[in-house]
Each structure stands twice: as C-alpha cells, then as structure tokens.
Amino acid sequence: MPNWTAAAAMLVAVLFFNLLFTPSFFHVAIRDGRLFGSLIDILNRAVPVGLLSLGMTLVIATGGVDLSVGAVMAISGTVAAGLIARPPETPFAGGKSVPALAIPAALLAAMGCGLFNGILVAILDFQPIIATLLLMVAGRGVAQLLANGQIVTFSEPSFAAIARGATAMLPNPVWLLAITFVLFSLATRATALGLFVEATGSNPSAANLVGINARAVKIAVYTLCALCGGLAGIVITGDIQAADANNSGLYMELDAILAVSVGGTALAGGRFSLVGSIVGALLMQALTTTILTRGVSPEITLVLKAAVVVTVCLLQAPAFRDSISRYLPKKVPA
Amino acid sequence: MTSILELKGIGKRFPGVVALDGVDFDLRAGEVHALMGENGAGKSTLIKTMTGVYEPTAGHILVEGNPISFRSPDEAVRHGVSTVYQEVNLVPNLSVMENILLGREPKGPFGIKWRGVKERAEKAVRRLGLDVDVRTPLGSLSIAVQQLVAIARALDVSARVLVLDEPTSSLDAGEVEALFEVVRRLRDEGMGIIFVSHFLDQVYAISDRITVLRNGQKVGTWMAKDLLKIELVSQMIGRDASALVRTESIAQAASSGEAIISAKSVGRRGSVSDVSFEIKPGETLGFAGLLGSGRTEVLRLIYGIDHSDSGTLIFDGKSVSKVRPRDSIHRGIGFLSEDRKAEGIFPELSIRENMLILYQVKQGWFRRIPLLKQKQLAKDLAEKLKVQPPDVERSIQQLSGGNQQKALLARWLAVEPRLLLLDEPTRGIDVGAKFEIMSLVESLRQSGSSFVFVSSELSEVVKTCTQVVVMRDRKAVGTLVGADITEESIVEAIAS
C-alpha cells in the first residue's frame, strides 16, 4: 500500500461529497474547443502548487526543505514580465521586447536561486530551513528591485497563452504539470538519482560511506526545486499578465510542503513519492474549490484545510493505525 | 582500612540476559579501585547498580556498613556516591557555575541566590586546583576542563565515593596527568574512587587495587602492584577452551604480488599514531587490541573517512593523500562499519536497494540497473549469504541484526572489492551468522581477495588472519606473522 493511499482516499471522499451535495459539480462542458467545469478548474488551479510540490518532494526526501520557492516564483515572474514589458526605471528599461527570451531567462534566474540554496546547504552546511529562509525573505526584495517596486503589467498574447490557452481540450498549465511530472519521474526513477536522493535522506553517513556524492545530489535537488518555482512563476504571471513581486506565490511554498507531506513523503527524508505529492496538491485544491463553490466564507477554508491535513497525516502514521485497528473487528484468516 | 562501599552478591537480570551474577566488590576509603573487563563484561551494569540507575535483582549494597537500596541516581548522590560519565553530561551553553549547581542552586525568597551559586562553585573549582572564571560558558572550555567541571559538580555534594567512568577517553597525555593529580589529591583526602578505563597504562598509573569482571562475573581483585599486565589481560579475556586452531592454509598463506596498500608510520593527531603495515593480495590483516586502542580509527584512515596528518599511505605503489570514501571505492577498497545502524543500513529502503546501492554508485547515477536485473542480483546475493527471510523486497529493518550484517556484506561483495575493511563484522550477531560470515571471508581470501579484520574476539583474529598488527593506547606496538599468531602471543604484545 503506497504512502499516499490516505490522501487519495480523502480526495475521493471530497469528490464523493460533491457528487451528493454539490449540483453540477461533475458537469463538464465543451466551449470553444476546450473543457470547462469544476473538475477542470481544480486541475488547472492545482498547477502552481503541483509544480512546486514536485521539486519540494525531492528536497524533502534528502532531509531538507525549501522555503524560498514562493520568492523564486516572484523573481522568475518579474524577469519574464520585465523582458516583455521593458518597464522604465528598471534594469530591463530600454531594449526591445523579447517574449521569446522571457521563459528561458526566467527559468535560468530561478535555477540560479536554486544553485545558491544548494551551495548554502550542501557546501556551507547551512540548516536547510535557514538557508532557504534567506532567499524566502531576500528573494522578494530582489524581485522588487528588479521591478523597481512596481507591478509590471504587459500584454503579450503568446506569453499569456501558457496560462490561459488550451491544447487538446485541456488548459495548457495542466499539460505543463503533466509533462513536468513525467520528466521528473523519468529523471528520478529511470536513472538512479531517485535512489541516491532517498539514500542521502535516509542515512547521510551511510550514503557517504557508499560513495554517494551527497553534495552534488543536494545541489541538484535544490536547483530542480527552484526550476519548478520558476515554472510556477511563469504560469501565474502569464495568467494575470502582470508580475507582482509582493504577492506572486506568497505562502505557496507552505502549500507545497503540505501537499508533499500529505502525499506520504516523510519530512525527515528517505522514501519519496511524486505521485503522492500530485495527489496531495489536487486534494488541497479540491478542498478549496469545494468550499468556494458551496459559498462558505474563505476564512473557513484555511481551518478546514488544516483539519484535513491533520486527518491525513494521522491516517498515515503507523502508530495511529495500530491504535485504531485494535477497535476494529479482527480479520479471520481464511 | 574500612570499606565505605560494599556490594555483596550483586545480580542483575534483563529479559533473557544475565548481566551480573553474584558480584562482590568493596571500595575502601582513600583508594583508587580500577574496574576492568572487556566490552560486555558487566562493568557499566555494575556501576549503574551502585549509582542507583539500575536496581539489582539479587544481593545488597552497604554504604559504611549500612544496607541501603538506591532507587534513583539522586538517592545515590545523597548517600555520597557521585558519578562522572564518559561523555560530559553537562549543558555547554550554561556557565561553569550554573553547571556545577544545576538543580541544587541555593534559593532565597527572590529565587536563585546567584552570589551563593558563585561562591559555592568557586569553592568546588578551587578544590580541584582549577583556575577558571566560573562565569565562563562551559562550551568554550576544553574537553579536559569540562571533564574537571563535571568532577567538581560531582564533588559539590559531600561525596565519599566518586565513580569515574572512562574519564580519560577524550583527553591527551598532559590533560590525563592533570586529572590524575586531582584524583590523587581526592584519594589522599580519604575519598574512595572507582576508575574505569580501557587504557592499561593509566590504570596502572593511578590504581591501588584492580577488580576484573568477565561475562558478568567477578574474576578477582588484586593489588595493582602484584598483578602483572599480562596477567591482567589474560584475566580480562579469559581462555576460550573451544577456540579452534588456525587452519593450515592460513598459517602457511604465502603473500605474493605487489602490496595493494602499505602504510608507513601513519597517524592523525588526537586519534592514532605510528601505524605501519602492508597488505598483499590473498592476505587477511588483523588489528588486535583492547577496545579503544585505535583499531577502528586506523580503518577510517585507510578508507578516507578521516585523513591522516603524518606518515604516508601508499596505494598500488602511489602515495595518496586526502582520499575520500568515493575514491577508495573506485580503487577497489571497501569498508564495513562496526555501527550497522548509524553507518550501514538505509532503514527506509528495501533489502534489494540496500544490497545494490554500491553497485549502482559504481555504475554512476545515469546508468540505472534495470529492475529485473536488480531483482536477480539481489536474489543471488541473498542466497549466497543465506539471508533469512530471502524476500529481498522487504524493508531491511525487518531483518535480524545478523541478517542485516549479511545484507551489508552482500553490498560489498556485489562490487567485488580487492580489499575489504571489516570492523567488528561479527559483533552482536548470532553464532550461526558469525560462522557463515567468517567462512565466507576465508574462502574469498583463498581466491585472492584481501581483508583487514578488526575484532574484539581474539579467537576470531587468530583463526582468520595471516598477519596481525597489535594496537595499544592508539599506537601499533607490534606485528605478528604466520605461525607466531596465537592468542598468547597477541595477549603478550598487548600487555608488554
């Protein structure tokens, strides 16, 4: 039984609740050659957290954590928007609008941030929570400097299409998440990278003794995590056609950490599950969407989310499962 | 002289284990009494019963002739029995005076009377001849001074018995002498001191009497000046009547070919010094010596976990420096740590992954071993080493200690190292697994592999090694080859 069974069961429960009590929740319509409906909406809106959770999964599996991805989203969004809009009084002022360069430049900037985190953690031996807290705080400052304190707006249909367009009936962000998920799965499970990540998180001293280059592994996962932050930043920026250094991706790193832990990856490191993290991200979004469509006030959303996270985490814990299984009827062996 | 602490017929059982069996022990006022024994002989259990950590299951304790049962360490302290443990058990970020009086600060109507704390701490520190500002944070002082502060803390209550459990293991020679001066002064003041150490020379330097334990029983008590070192070592080790004789093939193993690795007076400050040896294909080199004599440290230097700072290590005729474990693996050297849990297994991973991770590391991260091949390899290894149960997809945590050890050995066998460093490979595992591991090592040696073997069990060293380097007090003190390797000759070299 994979570790994400509890999260998947909870997701099914939330959907089942809607099947019974929320009219037309499962209604999917085709308009302008693309699908619309609450389910599609959940998929689409889960994308930024889903992207973040993929990278976060690997970082957490090494026994670390990355608090800076929200800020990395802001930086990547600002770089992209800056290269398109060329706002005056910023480092991007002057020059031609280069939408084609926006995405690679934004991703490079994000990976630079990840490299910085990785070097702090792997080479300078910072505690991951402190190392990434630095960029969590300073990163938004950097983004604001790049934008000169403004919200950089632009109008560039080709860029906005990343977030707003659709391909083969499904919104583009959903495809982006799906492709990233497949690439991450291949990179970790078709090579031995996943095993090395798990070994590093499971027992760092033993990993050193079997010759795993833990530094390289850590730098790689922090860089990949920031790359995910960069992708998420592009999606959010494309969606609103603006880069808001103050609010883009604010607290989203926390949602990603929740999605990962709900998805069955232990925060202490070791075994990880990318599928579980995606299930976790979908669960969080399904909850939010359910609560919103039922007209419950948004303040309650957060409390309810917390309750669900606690339940899922308890269901994952072997000690808790043992203690409740005592009250359940014993299975009689056939 | 009168006994201030007397133990009569002390027994201690744990579920399934008899740790102490009818041990008598007495401590006189004004003596230093050394408690000796190999690992697992029952020294620490005995100390824990006399300091109130354990309650004995048989026998009784007399303090100055009065029977007393300690129900907690605190109660022992109130009866004048204080203990200083091997690791400094203090709070590094509190000051010296806070540490000395932690939990028993003089209190007034407004809380702790800091002036009283300072005065009492200064008195306690001065008694040891220690010149230190008691307001300094403990962590900023050297380990030796911290050790003395721990003693000052133990003496602050009017202790009549002081138990020093391996107090010198992290001290250098000068610091040890300073500590001994304090111990002698306390002894002359009439205190009874129990001294536990693995360093024979130190035991002889400070002790008046020596009591030896073996397998939970008392072997005897001697005046230190009447007991030769070699007698002490034999008493500690005992004679294993069932010890097998060395096989002919080992005694006559002829070393041929170029040395895989040779060390010329290799050392590392604060760890080991002056270690020389040479290993050729088809040889098993043993490091013999008491626990703490520096055997493990040598293996860690060879494998590259620690780096030597004196002497030269020559690998395949080339002098190497700053090796890392990764480099050693690529040179065909392996290392099986004595600490399975902390440095061996990956608890979250399966038996298969635990066995094949090294093979995968050697392949590089990009060339993943296909799952089917992994399963086949793991199955073969599990069969070869008789891992029970043989289902390699289970978590390694579900295996017994002996089977975990086999899985870790399999990890190395999968990459066929030329030289495998085995640190206490048979410790804490059952007799069957022990035998299987030792036979496997011997058959691999005969087919040309080399081993370095560290074990506390001399009979194992004698049975498997083609040459033995004897370690004492973190130095190599002799090398035995071929027919010269007997338990007696090793004991003699340890004690000489």
Image (tube, coloured by chain):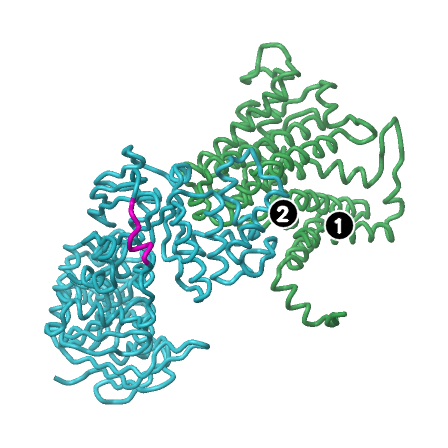
- The residue to which callout 2 is attached is A258
Specify the subunit that label 1 lies on.
A
Tag 1, which secondary structure? Answer: helix
* Image colour assigned to chain B: cyan
Instruction: Give the residues drawn in magenta, as a range.
Output: B248-255
Answer above or below: position of B284 versus B459.
Answer: above
Q: Residue at the spot x=87%, y=53% of the render?
A: A20
Q: Residue at the spot x=58%, y=37% of the render?
A: B368
**x and y percentages locating residue B334 in the rendered image:** 40, 45
Q: Residue at the spot x=48%, y=49% of the render?
A: A203
- The residue to which callout 1 is attached is A11
Answer above or below: position of A63 versus B194.
Answer: above
Instruction: Classify residue A55 as left or right of residue B438.
Output: right
Instruction: Classify residue B234 as left or right of residue A311.
Output: left
Of residue A272 and residue A246, the one placed in the foreground of this image is A272
Specify the subunit that label 2 lies on.
A
Instruction: Classify residue A122 as left or right of residue B350.
Output: left
Answer above or below: position of B270 versus A215.
Answer: below
Within 10 Å of disc 1 (Cα), the crowding (few <14, some 14-19, many 20+) is many
**x and y percentages locating residue A315 in the rendered image:** 67, 59
**x and y percentages locating residue B186 in the rendered image:** 14, 71
Q: Amino acid at mark 1?
A: Leu
Please count the marks in the image.
2
Quarter where residue B132 is shown: bottom left
Tag 2, which secondary structure? Answer: helix
Is-magenta flag for residue B400? no
Of callouts 2 and 1, the N-terminal one: 1
Q: Amino acid at mark 2?
A: Leu
Measure the alpha-carbon separation of dots 2 and 1. 14 Å
Is-magenta flag for residue B253? yes
